[in-house]
Amino acid sequence: MLFSCYYRVVIDNAVCPTATLVKVDSARRDGILLGAVQVLTDLNLSIKKAYISSDGQWFMDVFHVTDLNGNKLTDESVISYIEQSLETSFPDRSHGFDGSTALELTGTDRVGLLSEVFAVLADLQCNVVDAKVWTHNGRIASLISVKDCNSGSPINDSQQIDRIESRLRNILRGDNDIRSAKTSVSLAITHTERRLHQMMFADRDYGRKPVLQCREDSPVVTVQNWAERGYSVVNVQCKDRAKLLFDVVCTLTDMQYVVFHATINTAEDKAYMEFYVRHTDGTPISSEAERQRVVQCLRAAVERRASDGVRLELCTSDRQGLLANVTRTFRENGLNVTRAEISTTNDIARNVFYVTDAIGNVADPKIIETVREKIGLGELKVKELPLIYHEREEAAVGVGGAVLSLGSLVRKNLYNLGLLIKSYS
């Protein structure tokens, strides 16, 4: 337990039999809820339940958390780290890039775009040490940290930076994205994943037409006003997943809403979240247009990190042009990268890619296997099946008197991919 003039953190393993309770009492200030959620999600903890209440100038949060395996927290070093981090959490503080240059990219997504980006960076002698890539509604946002290949230092030369930005901007523009394609260099950011949300929000991905039709597990968002208390009540119901609460709270915060009270519950694979919010000036949502915008933005916040596609993990020695070669192989075999996380530690590249076919459907297992053979069976492994295809209803298509079950074909593809996971994990 740690105390300060305005903060008290208690971590309790005795009250709940299935989760560790993290209790935070604090003087209320801007971003306090986001800061607490950010600390927990950055440690890859699952938030099973949460209760948030603001009484006057005091803020009280209670989080029920487990590790990713569903176990309570028992490591004293982890518990101590949580206490110290929560006591000093300031979500608006900036973080440097630890000796690298950060590139921000937004534009229209297309098959093979990522391979073109990494090919340009390799050609310009840029070594990618870290990157996160999100796609949503036909748009792409990426934060890429690079160093000079020869010196291993950040790229500070203004002319070289101009060349990098110019060539990447040309790639992002393609044939029809002259206005919305953007590239920039950032010296510091608030938080990588928060920045990705901000970039996609600024790009207005939430208002664009989805690439795939609405599916059964699409998030349900409602907004109503509680006039007597001056709150807007926001409800979100969707499939539960890692970092879900962070994505929703991050978006509400960046849209200039303050959460005064909230209840979060999860049951099996579903999440139920209710937030009582006001504008930063103390007023509730005031128009139908604003209500619709909140609904759209929260749906987008949930969907951006949804794991569409087969999860492929690459672990190998880092080398010049590695990402360009891997993503080119994806492109040449008709695979589209919907999300990616790139990291390098001690010259070992640990990369995660979510891939679909060219139009966003489940990838053919034979193509996945062909790609693995080309890249290296021991280096590229299938780790996760696309969740969106597990609950698809069967549909029948008649062709020349024959009836073909699309549902059975999907299940067959999933079965074959399952065999790949068992064989090569």
Image (spheres, grey):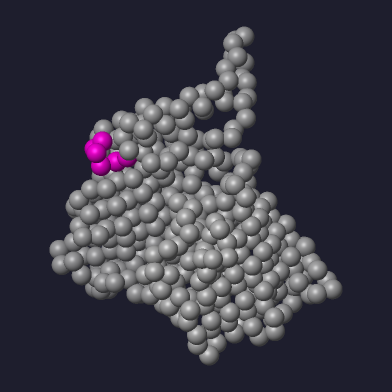
35 or 394, nearer to the observer: 35
- Tell me the residue at 24%/65% (across/down): 147
**Residue for point 48% across, 66% down:** 40
Left or right: 288, with 418 as reference point: right
Q: Is residue 412 left or right of residue 372?
A: right
What's the residue at 33%, 55% (across, down)?
342
* Residue lying furthest bottom: 5
Q: Is residue 275 above or below residue 269?
A: below
Give x and y (percent) for residue 231. 76, 72
Q: Residue furthest right?
A: 228
The residue closer to the viewer here, 333 or 355, is 355
Specify the quadrant of the image occupied by residue 334.
Answer: top left
* Residue 191 position in % (x across, y down): 44, 69
Q: What segment is highlighted magenta in the picture?
A: 376-381
Q: Is residue 364 left or right of residue 379?
A: right
Q: Position of residue 76 (x, y in %)?
A: 39, 69
The stretch drawn in magenta includes residue 167: no
